[in-house]
């Protein structure tokens, strides 16, 4: 069988003080007809990256709502993950030609996953491209099958998308973060728009005393008495870590005591990350005010929380970004964000949380503006936190999944989640 990931039990009641009693009551109402339904989530890795951040909370809360929910991962090897990382980059617009070896590696691995798939489920949610062929290879399996795409497909490589599209079209429904991510040739009856979310009471996002946050950052070489710029991201070309360093160097010419920290988690399904990590280290050179740390240095959820709270400005200078959970994480802590004007980032920032930028010069100017204006930092941080509370917490994510499950079971398409409008309004009848 596919490996089962154990997740801790969670209680919806614990989220009511943050998300509101009404939000929890609506979840209970939506969940009542679904009680006892068997739900399976499948993805590529149990740590590193946004999907592995979301699933423990989503599964735990689904179980507390009365759904029998499991999370399992596929047993890919290095050759397979090299291919799927290339597919990921191609889907985000990188030029790529798929040769026969790559196609065969992907097909054979998914055939193995399909053979390892066991059990009967009412709802099966397959996350991202790595296991996307599972439904096509298990056409007789029961239940409603959903493909959840966490990637920005607005500029998808036509060859890569053409390779993946038949697998996606085998599903009963697909979930995207934004309507713009849906390719025009996708033939699928049910398309839902569900932004990702953060867990507000997890160790990464729970309240943390400022003095403790500063002391943790100090352990990793940060001087809490001086301003800190921070980016929390995997080492991925789309996160533009070198661009972040260039922004820091430009800011430092105007604010000499500024510091930069790049904090990352190395994921098992991303072999490219190691090469980029080494490249970034070389590019950074010897700079005592520039810290590059990862989970291998002992940085876990609490440490990321501390770094974010110790920062004056958080950067997310992405060139492509399906969503970018670290934006909502920083905003939840009242820290303004300077971020790339791409993908799901504008939806998170709205007009209240920071500055959207499209170049190194724009990012530099935004950082300087915020570093020089503490009151602006405070007001943007407060606005950003409230926006996250309304739209990007785990309770809203759970509610949207329950609404989609109900729509698939009953045929009531008015319940299919329609996402978050640019104005910040939650769309769809389940809102």
Image: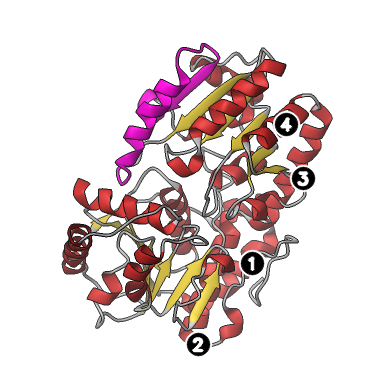
Q: Please, what secondary structure does the residue beneath circle 4 have?
A: helix
Locate residue 260: give its quadrant: top right
Q: Is residue 121 placed above or below 375 in the rendered structure?
A: below
Please determine whether, in this image, residue 17 is positioned above or below residue 299.
below
Q: Residues under labels 3 and 4: Cα distance?
A: 21 Å
Mark 2 falls on what kind of element? helix
Bin the neighbour count of mark 3 within 10 Å (Cα to Cα): few under 14, some 14-19, many 20 and up: many
Q: Is residue 66 left or right of residue 354?
A: left
User: How far across and how far down the image is residue 375, in percent?
Assistant: 83, 30
Q: Is any part of residue 302 visible from this angle? A: no
* Residue 84 quadrant: bottom left
- Which quadrant is home to the C terminus? bottom right
Query: Is there a contact, CB below 8 Å, between mark 4 and mark 1?
Result: no
Magenta-drawn segment: 268-297
Q: Which residue is mark 3?
A: 383
Label 2 to label 1: alpha-carbon separation: 21 Å
Q: Earlier in the sequence, mark 3 or mark 4?
A: 4
CA–CA distance between discs 2 and 4?
Answer: 52 Å
Q: Residue at x 43, y 52 (%)?
A: 51
């Amino acid at each position: 069988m596919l490996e089962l990931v154990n997740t801790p039990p969670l209680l919806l009641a614990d989220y009511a003080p943050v998300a509101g009693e009404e939000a929890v009551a609506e979840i209970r109402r939506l969940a009542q007809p679904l009680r006892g339904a068997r739900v399976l989530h499948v993805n590529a890795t149990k740590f590193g990256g946004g999907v592995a951040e979301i699933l423990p909370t989503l599964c735990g809360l689904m179980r507390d709502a009365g759904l029998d929910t499991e999370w399992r991962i596929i047993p890919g090897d290095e050759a397979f993950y090299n291919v799927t990382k290339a597919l990921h980059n191609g889907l985000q617009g990188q030029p790529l030609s798929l040769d026969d070896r790559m196609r065969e590696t992907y097909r054979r691995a998914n055939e193995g996953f399909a053979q390892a798939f066991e059990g009967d489920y009412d709802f099966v949610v397959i996350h991202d491209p790595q296991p996307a062929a599972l439904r096509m290879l298990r056409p007789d399996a029961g239940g409603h099958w959903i493909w959840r795409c966490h990637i920005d497909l607005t500029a998808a490589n036509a060859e890569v998308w053409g390779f993946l599209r038949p697998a996606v079209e085998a599903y009963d429904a697909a979930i995207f973060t934004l309507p713009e991510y849906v390719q025009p040739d996708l033939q699928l009856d049910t398309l839902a728009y569900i932004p990702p979310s953060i867990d507000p009471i997890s160790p990464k996002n729970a309240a943390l005393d400022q003095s403790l946050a500063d002391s943790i950052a100090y352990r990793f070489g940060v001087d809490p008495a001086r301003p800190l710029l921070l980016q929390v991201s995997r080492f991925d070309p789309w996160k533009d870590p070198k661009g972040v360093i260039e922004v820091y160097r430009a800011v430092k010419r105007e604010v000499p005591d500024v510091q930069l920290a790049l904090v990352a988690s190395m994921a098992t399904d991303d072999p490219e990350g190691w090469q980029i990590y080494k490249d970034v280290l070389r590019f950074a050179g010897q700079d005592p005010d520039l810290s590059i740390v990862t989970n291998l240095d002992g940085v876990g959820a609490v440490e990321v929380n501390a770094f974010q709270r110790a920062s004056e400005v958080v950067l997310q200078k992405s060139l492509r970004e399906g969503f970018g959970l670290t934006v909502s994480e920083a905003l939840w802590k009242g820290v303004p964000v300077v971020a790339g004007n791409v993908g799901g980032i504008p939806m998170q920032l709205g007009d209240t949380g920071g500055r959207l930028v499209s170049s190194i010069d724009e990012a530099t100017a935004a950082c300087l503006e915020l570093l020089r204006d503490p009151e602006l930092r405070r007001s943007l941080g407060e606005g950003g936190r409230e926006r996250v509370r309304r739209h990007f917490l785990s309770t809203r994510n759970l509610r949207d999944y329950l609404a989609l499950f109900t729509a698939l079971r009953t045929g009531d398409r008015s319940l299919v989640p329609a996402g978050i409008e640019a104005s910040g309004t939650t769309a769809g009848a389940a809102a």
